[in-house]
Image (tube, coloured by chain):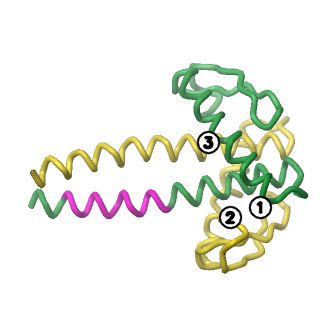
Chain colours: A green, B yellow
Amino acid sequence: MSEEQKNRATVEIYGQQYKVVGAESAAHIRFVASMVDEKMREIGSMNPVLDTSKLAVLTAVNAVNDYIKLKEQYEKLEIEIKKLKD
Amino acid sequence: MSEEQKNRATVEIYGQQYKVVGAESAAHIRFVASMVDEKMREIGSMNPVLDTSKLAVLTAVNAVNDYIKLKEQYEKLEIEIKKLKD
């Protein structure tokens, strides 16, 4: 989600408001924001001494880790499909 | 990555050190951290007035958004494989 795209949504994450801009619909942006809020609360409850900034960084670390793991599974499926088609 | 798992790595993200614990190897944790650092610098360069905390939250928003998009593609592949196998 960057500054160059069209839809805007104001969302609340961990008690703070953000104006998010993206190509996705406002509803999608709000859904993503609610997932980040949930993940931050989950990680925050396990690490109560973390400040918001560190908590947000660790949330990003978790999200990127989930992405990489899914990407590996995705690549396996692509190979499987290629074999099935051959 | 949570407190219950085994491997530990000290990583630097956006000039700040973090001790990250995960089931993944220390090398994998460092790779994920370097991706988060890169994403934060990319978003930070487009939004120079953001403080670290907001920048980290927006990085998490981007990472979760990427995850959801990949998840949708993954589910499409699963349906395609199911059809090919039937």
Residue at x 71% of width, y 21% of height: A10
The residues bearing labels 2 and 1 have C-alpha atoms spaced at a distance of 6 Å
Q: Secondary structure at mark 3?
A: helix
Q: Is residue A77 left or right of residue B52?
A: left
Q: Position of residue A3 (x, y in %)?
A: 65, 28
Q: Chain of mark 2?
A: B
Q: Evaluate whether label 2 is on the same chain as label 3.
A: yes
Q: Position of residue A24 (x, y in %)?
A: 52, 26
The residues bearing labels 2 and 3 have C-alpha atoms spaced at a distance of 15 Å
- Mark toward the start of the polypeptide (3 vs 1): 1
Q: Is residue A30 left or right of residue A18?
A: left
Instruction: Name the amino acid type tagged 1.
Output: Ile
Question: Where residue B13 is drawn, which disc sits there?
Answer: 1
Crowding at mark 3 (Cα within 10 Å: few <14, some 14-19, many 20+): many
Instruction: Name the amino acid type tagged 3.
Output: Asn
Q: Chain of mark 1?
A: B
- Mark toward the start of the polypeptide (2 vs 1): 1
Identify the main secondary structure in magenta. helix
Q: Is residue B74 left or right of residue B85?
A: right
Q: Which residue is mark 3?
A: B62
Q: Camera-side residue: B2 or A61?
A: B2
The residues bearing labels 3 and 1 have C-alpha atoms spaced at a distance of 16 Å
Q: Which residue is mark 2?
A: B33
Question: Where residue A57 is drawn, which disc sits there?
Answer: none
Crowding at mark 1 (Cα within 10 Å: few <14, some 14-19, many 20+): many
Query: Which residues fall within the magenta stretch?
Result: A69-81
Q: Tell me whether the residue at label 2 lies in contact with that at label 1, contact meaning CB atoms closer than 8 angstroms.
A: yes
Residue at x 38% of width, y 61% of height: A73
